Amino acid sequence: MAKSELILALEQIEREKGIKKEEILHMIEGAVISSLRKHVGKDTVIEAVIDPETAEFHANVVKKVADPVTNPELEISPAEARRYKKDAVVGEDVKLPAPAADFARIAAQTAKQVLTQKVREVERDKLFDEFKPKEGEIVSGSVHRFMDRNIVVDLGKTEAILPMREQIRRERYNVGGRVRAVILRVDKAQRGPQVLLSRAAPLFLRRLFELEVPEIGEKIVEIIEVVRDPGFRAKVLVKSNDPKIDPVGSCVGIRGSRIRSIMNEVSGERIDLIPFSDETRTLLSNALAPAKVAAVRVLDEANRLAEAVVSEEQLSLAIGKDGQNVRLACRLTGWNIEVKSEAQKGAETKAAHEQAAGSLSSLEGIGPKTAEILVKGGMTDIQRLAQCKPGDLTTLQGIGEKTAAKIIASAQAYVKEHASAEPEPSSHPGAAAPEEHPQA
């Protein structure tokens, strides 16, 4: 028996698109039943079968023989039933042929709709399956059109969106122009996969380094962290897994060829390459490049707070325009870095020393000169001084054993006096409440 044109077409679609012929026929059967139900009643029992070889359609309405008939959609009288089956009896199911003209038209219409829908679904799923694993990869496409300030990029097989927030602010795009970007995310949508692109993400810069620097691909050099102010400045923390290889030199390339190529791709964005260090102070000092840091002091390790001191001429470079450099350094390291000039730090230290010396001078037997010696030796706290031994102070120039003992005794007397001067809370049940201030 010769195959019909429909079956031949379905077999070709199965080969090209991977859609099974039986699946399409089953969907057509279901759609035909749904369409016929509109004509013969929503509760009617309908059977529809398509021959998988000839594509011939057979559809029947199934009704139960009943006397009397209470539901015409589901039941048929014995006299009417015997027109289709001579020996029909009450309680038996009888199959009535569906209206042929309606059936043929509906079947043809439905076949077309189902095929179109199914082909689209399969193509959408294939595109999604193709692009989903590409998340995080760099792709190239052309600007197709603009939607407000978002850009629709033609990737060939599908379109992608480059939202305004993921664009480099200083760049301008023209229809037909080429665009390289990283695939941030691929989601399923009604019209196919929704591909979200980015040129502003740190991931885009990371992938450019991986493409341009072979040592990164070979895992000799490792990118620890990337932070960006897209189009303006970026900091890249790099580490070498081979002591013979300089991670910064590898990324820069011969005469800056590698880093220049990457900077050109991101519209001239300045890129600071920061060598990684396990030593916190060194890492924080490196992170403030291109500024040269004189000293770094960790103020609070638990809360990751540090202070960096730079020369006066390096202060504006360390902070950067609108605080950009120090802000990126903080994001790169995860530390809050407070930048101060040597003059600012000197003025703070002098003020603190003067305050400490004044406080020590109030102790009996300690003059301004002795107070200054103690402050320079790091003895700025009276409480700490009270707990010292004479030997702790005799190491300081100009303080003998007797003077040391006298200083400690004076500090202890001060601590004792101020401890006893503090009012103790009364626990007596009959104690009077504090007197209220009279109203004005």
Image (cartoon, grey):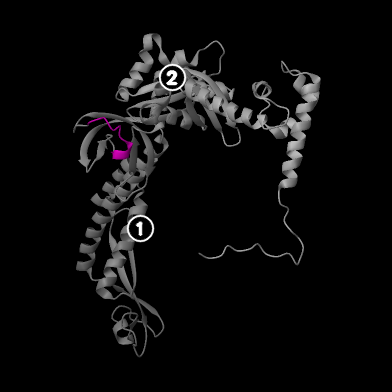
Which is nearer the eye, 218 or 278?
278
Query: Which residue sits furthest bottom?
Result: 68
Q: Quadrant of residue 148?
A: top left
Which is nearer the eye, 205 or 401?
401
The image position of residue 254, as x and y in percent, is 39, 9
Residue 100 seen in the figure: yes
Q: Helix, strand, or loop for circle 1?
A: helix
Residue that appears at 78% across and 18% down = 400
Identity of the amino acid at label 2?
Answer: Glu
| Mark 2 neighbour density, 10 Å: few (under 14) some (14–19) many (20 or more) | few
Query: Magenta segment range?
Result: 159-172
Check residue 11 in the rendering and tell me which mark sits there, or answer none. Answer: none
The image position of residue 182, as x and y in percent, is 36, 32
Residue located beneath label 2 in the image: 312
Q: CA distance from mark 2 to mark 1?
A: 81 Å
Q: Helix, strand, or loop for circle 2?
A: helix
Left or right position of 147 against 306: left
| Mark 1 neighbour density, 10 Å: few (under 14) some (14–19) many (20 or more) | some
Which is nearer the eye, 230 or 349?
349
Q: Quadrant of residue 367?
A: top right
Which is nearer the eye, 426 or 42?
426
Identity of the amino acid at label 1?
Answer: His
Tag 2 and tag 1, C-beta contact below 8 Å: no
Residue that appears at 73% across and 53% down = 424
Going from N to C along the chain, the mark reached first, 2 or 1, is: 1
Q: Please say whether residue 170 is one of the residues in the magenta stretch.
A: yes
Residue located beneath label 1 in the image: 26
Decide: is 319 above or below 8: above
